[in-house]
Amino acid sequence: MTIQNYSDAVANFRLEDVAALFDGDLEKGINACYECCDRHVAPGKVALQWEGKDGDSATYTFAQLKELSAKFANYLVSRGVKPGDRVAGLMPRVPELLVVILGTWRAGAVYQPLFTAFGPKAIEYRLDRSEAKLVVTDSVNRSKLDDVNDCPPVLTVVRSNATLTAGDADFWAEVDKQSTEFDPVMLRGDDLCMMLFTSGTTGLAKGVPVPIKALMGLGQYMRQAVDLRDDDIYWNIADPGWAYGLYFGVTGPLLQGHATTFYDGPFTVESTYRMIEKYKITNLAGAPTAYRLLIAAGEQAALPVKGKLRVVSSAGEPLNPEVIRWFEEHLACPIYDHYGQTEIAMVVCNHHALKHHVQPGSAGFALPGYRVAVVAEEGGEAVELPPGKPGILAIDRSQSPLFWFPGYWQQDTKAFVGPYYLTGDTVELNDDGSISFVGRSDDIITSSGYRIGPFDVESCLIEHEAVMETAVVGKPDPERTELVKAFVILRDGYKASPELAEELQMYVKHRLAAHAYPREIEFVAELPKTPSGKIQRFLLRKQEAEKVNPPAQHG
């Protein structure tokens, strides 16, 4: 296969060529389910290969998903769900998840993912903000909705030996009684198909509305950065409760008419290598945390799959050069770094399908269809910086025809300065036009590939009766990149103890999210603040970083 030069791909990019890859028309009528399912129906053509944590497995064809999505769409209509309404899914990586996503799109509604590690507080906030009309879950996760105030109606996938909660509807009992005929609701490119939420630093999670036209950029990423080929066996190990898994573990491959892989089990080195061998995976995507665990298991564990992976993609946090070298030596495949956000999907990549210089430690070049810049804010304007000067990574909307983010859902949060969307991440422009990641300019914590807003953790901790005030930061950690650490001031009458620290940890773990609880808690008498009373988290971060890597002594 001939690999195109990156410069040629940029020079020859035309939005109309990308739009022409759809069967529908972004102005006259288009449906995400049709684009990701119906048009790919062919005898025996597989859309999903699935394996459960207990060893069960199944395959689903595009034809089967077309019928099941029609049934689910009919159920939604019977419940009064209309085009544009939000339908939430609190579901693991199971076949029903695809039925819900595709059926929601088929009905012209908007799919909203809920990460299965979320606790009631995180779920309640997201459901309230989105005004979801229905929540679909399974028996394993159903109890998390018990403490959600004003919870929408619940449709539950009942697992073996489980009992249906009073008031819920049984997923398969309801879906099976529906017709397999449902014409996809035709929409326009600016109409929504997904609603995600991303964490912030000075407020609660922000809603990210995703229009149908965003599928153009998702497809571009799959073709040029992931290099998904017809003969590939593709597995994205990211959870579809988050952007990378939903955008590129579900939507991206199905949009290309390509099968995706679901493994509904905990991530382990053994399970990962076993899945690669069993399903003959050739194209793998995930986060650096997972890849570092593979390295930690050693070269002997990797030997059976050496040479079987064609390409590997990494996203979620910067990929360090050690991982790149190890994959080349012990798995005999290239692993490339990609950068994106929930708000914009993937925009800076080392492209597997395009020929350009790949510099270890660099996030790569702008995905064709985007123009990125490094800027500094001066006098309310964004000023572009030359190579070698650190600044904020920005997307120039005026020269990025694939840019789709319309702004946060029902929030007037600053995201744009003039023609630029500001990512909030600090980078440098290299002489060759590539981008190198420097660090975050905000307080977001990156832990095991998840982006965690300290405000969410703080607002959960402060609800505990023992906590008067708290500040949460990321502490450098070799395995997770960062771990969540909380500094806590206790109310009168409470004494610091390991038992209280554990109680606070479990409180956050159960109320907010399993991945976001503070793995370390330090009880303090005061917190560093500005004269106006704003907590200076950067001083706490600096303090923790210096504990891990003490500054050099001079003199």
Image (cartoon, rainbow, N blue to C red):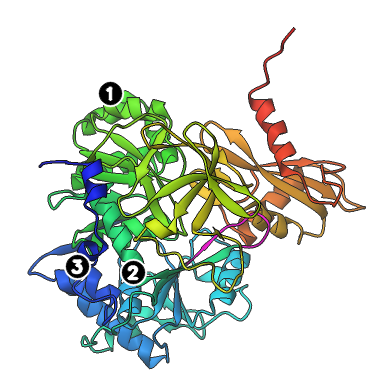
Foreground of the two, 35 or 173: 35
Q: Residue at x 29, y 79 (%)?
A: 27
Q: Which residue is mark 1?
A: 329
Lateral position of residue 138 relative to residue 225, left or right: right
Label 1 sits on what residue type? Answer: Glu
N-terminal label among 3 and 2 = 3
Work out how far the residue at label 3 is from the one at label 2, CA to CA, in angstroms: 12 Å
Q: Amino acid at mark 2?
A: Lys
Residue 418, given in percent of the width and then of the height, sits at 54, 59
Residue 64: % across, % down: 19, 73
Q: SS for tag 2?
A: helix
Residue 435 lies, with reference to residue 109, above or below; the image says above
| Residue beneath the point at 82% across and 45% down | 529
Pick whichever, 438 or 42, lies toward us.
438
Name the residue located 42 percent from the left edge and 48 percent from the top edge. Answer: 372
Instruction: Quote the CA–CA distance across marks 1 and 2.
Output: 40 Å
The answer to whether residue 396 is above or below residue 41 is: above
Q: Which residue is mark 3?
A: 20
Q: Which residues are magenta?
A: 196-204
Q: Which residue is at a point 79% across and 51% down the rendered structure image?
A: 534
- Whether the magenta-drawn stretch holds residue 202 is answered as yes
